């Protein structure tokens, strides 16, 4: 069977293939009052992978990245396995170490994040050998998840290789999902604009956050941001508006506003990541874009009402 026949009808047959999420998963460190440290695994592309797997257990979800061969990398793999995320496409860099971040809370209760990620093994993913492994497995990929953070941590050669892979998948009928997640600390704005526009040309589904579009392009309104997205010609465009919910793109400029749920937000980490997972899970099971966005808002509301990127399984809507 050719790749294109094999991948036809992806929306209906997603359970036959896998979702691949590409990016950096870090070890999250949470210092406790008694001096101990609790750890977890997190990172935008990993958070979306976890929530999607929880919502669509029959869908194989594979993480694509690189880790070291140290104890901390081993802990991250254990966190992946605990969430039933397949880590067999996570490359191992001998002598490498993973990215870490700590959540610190100051005397006023204000949280801040401290990162150790500039030398992380994830930056070395997509070596020639790793790309060959991915190419050999490509036929089984029905959904590819990419984010602005993923592109930010790679060099130009790897960025181009990743987008070439995405283009092949799109050609074969797979979904290529892009979350803008612009982080100014990771790359300069001109470089980010260049690569995000190239990625937007390749994606089939853009799930962007308005705040990030403002930071990257100085966009003045959600309507302007959505129009900019839709000009790339992707099939589906959704603009996340924080507590304002989201804007779902539609034919002939007819966007639909979906309000957020009323909730007491205690930590907005992974709001957008979980929204995307909720949206995709519903689209895969046949809901339309507006229904899918409503569920994205429902999941994100539960996530912002809890501390940490990944909420307990019992708290899932
Ligand atoms: N304070 C909030 N109350 C309820 N829902 C929220 C709140 N903040 C975010 N959300 C939900 O999370 C989604 C994504 O949030 P947003 O901040 O736009 O993304 P990101 O986290 O990527 O910046 C929103 O569309 C909304 O549904
Ligand atoms: Mg985001």
Image (cartoon, rainbow, N blue to C red):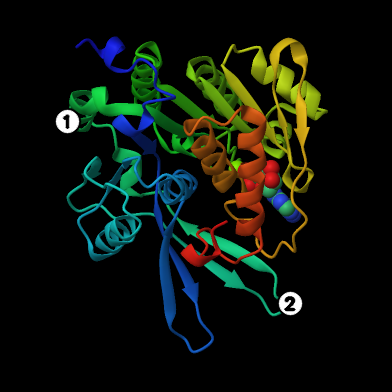
Q: Position of residue 194 (x, y in %)?
A: 55, 20
Query: Which image quadrant for residue 75?
Result: bottom left
- Which residue corresponds to mark 2? 108
Near mark 1 (Cα within 10 A), the count class, few <14, some 14-19 or many ≥20, is few
Going from N to C along the chain, the mark reached first, 1 or 2, is 2
Instruction: Assign a secondary structure to mark 1.
Output: helix
At x 44%, y 33%, the residue is 145
Q: Position of residue 287 (x, y in %)?
A: 57, 31
At x 36%, y 49%, the residue is 119
Report the front residue among 16 and 240. Answer: 16
Q: Position of residue 114 (x, y in %)?
A: 53, 62
- Residue 229 lies, with reference to residue 21, above or below; the image says above
Report the front residue among 131 and 283. Answer: 283
- Residue that sits furthest to the bottom in the current view: 34
- Residue 10 lies, with reference to residue 269, above or below; the image says above
- Residue 274 lies, with reference to residue 71, above or below; the image says above
Near mark 2 (Cα within 10 A), the count class, few <14, some 14-19 or many ≥20, is few
- Which residue corresponds to mark 1? 129
User: Ligand 1 closer than 8 Å to the CB at disc 2?
Assistant: no
């Amino acid at each position: 069977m050719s790749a294109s026949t094999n991948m036809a009808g992806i929306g209906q047959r997603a359970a036959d293939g896998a979702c691949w999420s590409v990016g950096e998963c870090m070890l999250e460190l949470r210092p406790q009052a008694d001096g101990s440290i609790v750890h977890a695994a997190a990172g935008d592309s990993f958070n979306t992978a976890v929530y999607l797997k929880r919502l669509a257990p029959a869908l194989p979800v594979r993480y694509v990245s690189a880790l070291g061969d140290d104890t901390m990398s081993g802990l991250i793999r254990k966190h992946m396995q605990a969430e039933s995320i397949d880590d067999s496409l996570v490359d191992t860099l001998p002598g490498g170490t993973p990215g870490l971040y700590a959540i610190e809370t100051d005397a006023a209760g204000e949280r801040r994040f401290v990162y150790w990620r500039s030398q992380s093994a994830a930056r070395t993913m997509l070596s020639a050998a790793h790309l060959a492994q991915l190419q050999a497995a490509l036929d089984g990929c029905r959904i590819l998840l990419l984010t602005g953070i993923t592109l930010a941590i790679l060099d130009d050669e790897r960025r181009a290789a990743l987008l070439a892979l995405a283009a092949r998948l799109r050609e074969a009928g797979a979904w290529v999902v892009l979350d803008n997640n612009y982080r100014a600390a990771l790359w300069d704005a001109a470089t980010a604009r260049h690569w995000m526009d190239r990625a937007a040309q390749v994606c089939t589904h853009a799930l962007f956050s308005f705040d990030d579009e403002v930071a990257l392009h100085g966009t003045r309104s959600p309507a302007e941001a959505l129009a900019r997205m839709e000009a790339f010609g992707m099939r589906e465009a959704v603009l996340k508006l924080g507590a304002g919910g989201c804007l779902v793109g539609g034919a002939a400029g007819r966007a639909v506003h979906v309000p957020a749920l009323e909730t007491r937000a205690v930590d907005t980490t992974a709001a957008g990541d979980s929204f995307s997972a909720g949206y995709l899970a519903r689209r895969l099971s046949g809901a339309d874009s507006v229904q899918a966005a409503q569920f994205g808002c429902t999941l994100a509301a539960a996530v912002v009402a809890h501390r940490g990127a990944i909420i307990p399984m019992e708290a899932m809507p």
